[in-house]
Image (cartoon, helix red, strand yellow):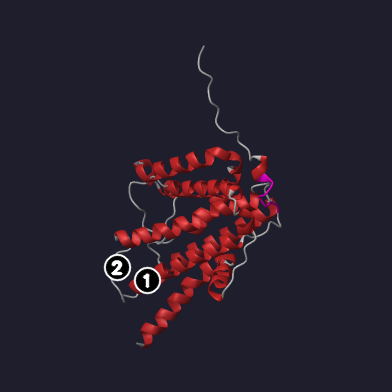
Amino acid sequence: MSARRKHPPPLRFEPAVAAVLPGGAHAQRMAFVDVLRGTAIVLMFAYHFSYDLNFFGAIDVDFNHSPLWLGFRTLIVTSFLGLVGVSLILAHGRRVASRALWARVARIVACAAAVSLASRIVFPNSMIFFGILHFIAVASVLGVVCVGLAGWLLPAGILAVVVGTTLSGAWFDQPWLQWFGLMTHKPVTEDYVPFLPWFGVVLIGMYIGRLLPRLRAWTALSQWTPQGGAVRTLAFAGRHSLPIYMLHQPIFLALLYLFFRVV
């Protein structure tokens, strides 16, 4: 007789996990997630302000090839997208809140379109056609589709990261496929977050989101309230990450323009 085949975990949430996951349009926000997102925003500020200083010629940095700055950008994008995955589970892990999901996606799509339009004006030769907001809009929809993958989330995420960082083909260099990744070269654009490998980071974040309710400290963590001005500021930034993202670069550029114009 042949050995009994071991089947993979079922494609559903275990009742013990689903029972403690928030769900629906009025799911409670988790302050610790907002603080982590706010911390990522601070790192983004540092990166973009340095990028803008380089744009105005105040510093001389090769952001496209410097290992330090490439690594810093990877850390920031990984933080944001990992939290996208965690948030998808916390918001839709028990049941999909369709109205809230589509309202959020619509806001992100509108902002992504505005970013593309603005970048087309400011950087006509390197406009943003698939940056982080474009990616998050797509990943939010596909991520919800993958919510029920349960134990498959981690291996699927790792596979997506490995494929996206090791494989490439000239066929993916075609303009209509550049959003997907797997290109043989980075396209000329100011912000590029392709579907692969970054959707793998979202899936891994979703897996982490499923593990959180199993922690002994989950009850305290889920009910934690930020204390202190700095931490509350980070939580506020995390709750309002989209408008902050949309406004910070125009503010940075305007302030630096005025500064260097006066100086």
Check the image and report above or below for 66 versus 22.
Answer: below
Out of 230 and 49, give the one closest to the viewer: 230
CA–CA distance between discs 2 and 1?
Answer: 9 Å
Residue that mark 2 sits on: 61
The residue beneath circle 1 is 50
Q: Secondary structure at mark 1?
A: helix
Mark 1 is surrounded, within 10 Å at the Cα level, by few (under 14), some (14 to 19) or many (20 or more) other residues, namely: some
Residue 239 lies, with reference to residue 186, above or below; the image says below
Q: Is residue 55 visible?
A: yes
Q: Is 34 on the left-hand or right-hand side of 118?
A: right
Q: Judge the density around disc 2: few (<14), some (14-19), many (≥20) Cα neighbours within 10 Å.
A: some
Amino acid type at mark 2: Val
What percent of the width, then of the height, locates residue 48?
Answer: 41, 69
The residue positioned farthest toward the bottom in the image shown: 262
**Label 2 with label 1: CB-CB less than 8 Å:** yes
Residue range corresponding to the magenta coloring: 18-24
